[in-house]
Image (spheres, rainbow, N blue to C red):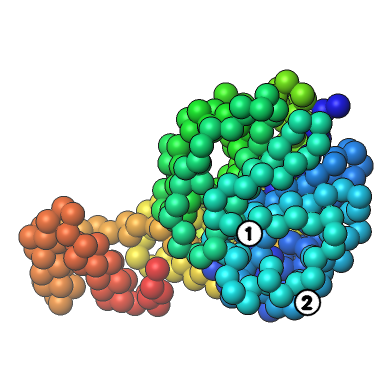
Amino acid sequence: MPLRLLHLADLHLDRAFAGMGCHGDLARRRRQGLRDALRRAGGEAQRRDCQVVTIGGDLYEHERAGPDTGRFLAETFAAWRPMRVVLAAGNHDALLPGSLYARTEWPDNVHLFTENRLRPLELGDGLTLWGLSHREPAWMGDPLDCEPVGGDGGVHLALFHGSELGSRPQDKSLHGPFRAGAVSMRGFAVALCGHYHRRRVDAEARLLYPGSPEPLAFDEESPRGPVVVEVDGTGLVSYEPLDLAAWTARTAEADLGGCTSLTGVVDACCAVAAGAVEGCDAERTLLRLHLSGELAPEVAVDIPTVETCVREATGAALVRARDLTLPGLDLEASLADPTARGLFTRELLGAIEAAGVDDPERAVLADALRYGLEALAGVEVGLR
């Protein structure tokens, strides 16, 4: 009889969301949304007659998770009986002394791997799930540093939180590093992983990252969340990704070139934003706008005004704008100006040319030139 399971990871219960700019009621809505996502995943697993739910780490955030979260998890998992729940701790929910894992009384259908080396859990019908937990946040062991499995003729699966080195996203922290090729070399039919927030269903490499069930940052736009995995007695694995996310993150670029006033800037941003959120539930949409293009120094880009107007126009739950525009400066006229404006321009341009191409000071001087010419033109200066 094939085994059907639902795999998820990187839920990050109790996340602050301050990094996205979510505060107050919105932050509370987002945290409740993570609990709702777990419930939806379990409900879908039950509807699809899954025997097991596997969770590949970062179920919660250790620094913020309290007893109420422990009770929520225990009650939620108990309601899924007879479906089994198998947990492997990651770096954000490491199995530390006094952790939520240690303080919570788990129902009898929950199995928590407690060692940092792969240990077996029999699932029946010749299927074995091997798992491990991070026992410290900075664990750097190789999850697949083990003897080959499968000598018994059965089918073996792996569950852990780790960084596949061949596909590590830029700036992503390194925890539990391993190589995808080791999955098949060690005899596993599939590695059910967590840590990377972008979904990766790689049948050839026998590797599955479901991705975070809800977007945790603006760059998490792609489909993500739980994946149903079916394994037959021969080790053949099939995957069915599910789209259960209730929240949406979007990033859009608004080219403000040609705008001659703040009103024009706002209108351009609202038009771009309307297209970005089209088809989304606006009340659960998180929008980031990159403002680009060249603007005359006298055209103000007031970020709070832009964000407020776009939020009111689209109904988006959150709007964050970043000013990446460049000054459309008439440097030739400034250089020839006999007043302080000309002296200022000549001094700054000389310093910029003297700075090396890769010198961080060059960007600082360029900003200083922009802000200075804006101020000399009588424009209210807003820092980017």
Q: Is residue 294 left or right of residue 369?
A: right
In the depicted view, which residue is nearer to us: 228 or 97?
97
Residue at (28% x, 66% y) in the render: 367
Residue 44 location, quadrant? top right
Q: Secondary structure at mark 2?
A: helix
**Residue drawn at 51 percent across, 69 percent down:** 303
Residue 266 vs 194, above or below: the answer is below
| Whether residue 104 is situated above or below residue 54 in the rendered picture | below
Q: CA distance from mark 2 to mark 1?
A: 22 Å
Q: Give residue 158's position: percent from left, percent from top.
A: 62, 40
User: Mark 1 packing: few (<14 Cα in 10 Å), some, or many (20+)?
Assistant: many
Residue lying furthest front: 152
Query: Which quarter of the rendering shows the N terminus?
Result: top right
Mark 2 neighbour density, 10 Å: few (under 14) some (14–19) many (20 or more):
few
Residue type at mark 2 is: Asp
Q: Quadrant of the C terminus?
A: bottom left
For the residues labelled 2 and 1, say whether their Cβ atoms are less than 8 Å apart: no
Secondary structure beneath dot 1 equals loop
The answer to whether residue 278 is seen in the rendering is no
Residue under label 1: 114
Give the residue pinned by disc 2.
68
Q: Which is more N-terminal, label 1 or label 2?
A: 2
Q: Inspect the image, locate mark 1, and give the three-letter code of the amino acid beneath it.
A: Thr
